[in-house]
Image (tube, helix red, strand yellow):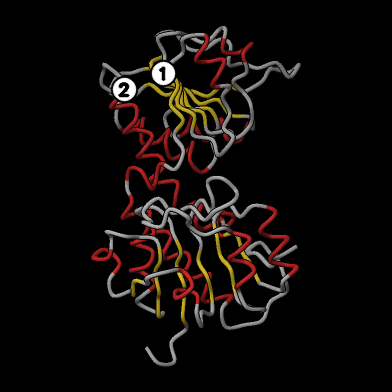
Amino acid sequence: MEGKIRLALLGGDGRQAFVARRLAEEYEVRVWGLEGLEERYAPARSCRNWHEAIEGADAVLLPLPCSADGVRVFAPHSADAEGIRLDVLLGELKKGILLLGGRLPETVRRRAEEREIRWADYLENEVLQLRNALPTAEGAIAIAMAELPVTLDGAEIAVVGYGRIGSLLAQKLHALGARVTVYARRAEQRALAVLQGAKALPLTDREGHSCLSSLPRGLRVLFSTVPHPLFSESVLREFPRECLLVDLASPPGGVDRAAASALGIKTVWGSALPGRYAPESAGEILGQTLAELLGELIDRPCSRGETEKGGK
């Protein structure tokens, strides 16, 4: 291990074990907060406490999400009930160290800059988002297969949004024999959806009114991928009660879940699907992306608050 760059990996769900294993191919990796998963992340080294993990580290890797409550590092596998307070961690990191995390709170970013700690939010990395589209799409299909009383082959399905996730999901559903209708804002997205075997409709009409109030007859499931509040109470009043609504948008989502529940609409919020349905694949994707990002950032100086998008 002598001469290797040292990384401290703190907390996380089952994905992080595979992240640690991947990064251990190139770096000295010390792990805290993944009790019971040691076999998965060998040859990375397990630490008794987080202070030991960060000692002498060149970079600290926080999970995705960095925190579930904005106060402590997300660490569901940790046996330490106290966990790690983010403010305490930042107070102990040395000047110039690199801090990487997914969905870093604004308070963490500001505090890091105050202490001259370099940081990057890897969830903003376009490569990671593209790679994550595959396990997300497969996880969404797994939800539909578990919830629906019918096969996807021949089922009427709608996909709202035709970005990274929506386009891949629509293609996979079409390949399974589903009758797919895509709702997309841009004309070029709708044209592409048609070329790939789906029907395509605009999200709004010329006056800006939602087109989601008139959905295809017999619709069995609708996947929403747009991170905006498209499914308000007024739209949900017209939503077919027999249709499953799966919200794949990033937090806070695109569905008024309280209104959906009050109206008797079955809704599933598909958050963190890669980690829930394919932790090994998701961990390897994240590990590969972090290895590439570390290769860009760890050996060269960069300005405070620099992210893979070019900084602030």
SS for tag 1?
A: strand
- Residue 36 tag number: none
Horizontal and vertical percent position of residue 51: 49, 73
Compared to 74, does 197 lie above or below? above
In which image quadrant can residue 85 be found? bottom right
Left or right, residue 79 beside residue 241 = left
Residue at the spot x=34%, y=77% of the render? 25
Circle 1 residue = 244
Separation of residues labelled 1 and 2 (CA atoms): 8 Å
Q: Amino acid at mark 2?
A: Glu
Compared to 116, does 77 lie above or below? above
Horizontal and vertical percent position of residue 13: 39, 52
Circle 2 residue = 147
Residue at the spot x=39%, y=46% of the render? 274
Q: Nearer the viewer, residue 259 or 111?
A: 111
Residue at the spot x=31%, y=55% of the render? 280
Residue at the spot x=52%, y=59% of the render? 84
Image quarter in which the C terminus is found: bottom right
Compared to 187, does 6 lie above or below? below
Horizontal and vertical percent position of residue 267: 45, 21
Q: How many marks?
A: 2
Q: Nearer the viewer, residue 150 or 273?
A: 273
Q: Amino acid at mark 1?
A: Leu
In which image quadrant can residue 268 be found? top left
Callout 2: few (<14), some (14-19), or many (20+) C-alpha neighbours within 10 Å?
A: few
Compared to 81, does 49 lie above or below? below
Q: Nearer the viewer, residue 93 or 134?
A: 93
Image quarter in which the N terminus is found: bottom left
> Pointers 1 and 2 in contact (CB under 8 A)?
yes
Q: Nearer the viewer, residue 177 or 307?
A: 307
In which image quadrant can residue 258 be found? top right
Mark positioned earlier in the residue sequence (1 or 2): 2
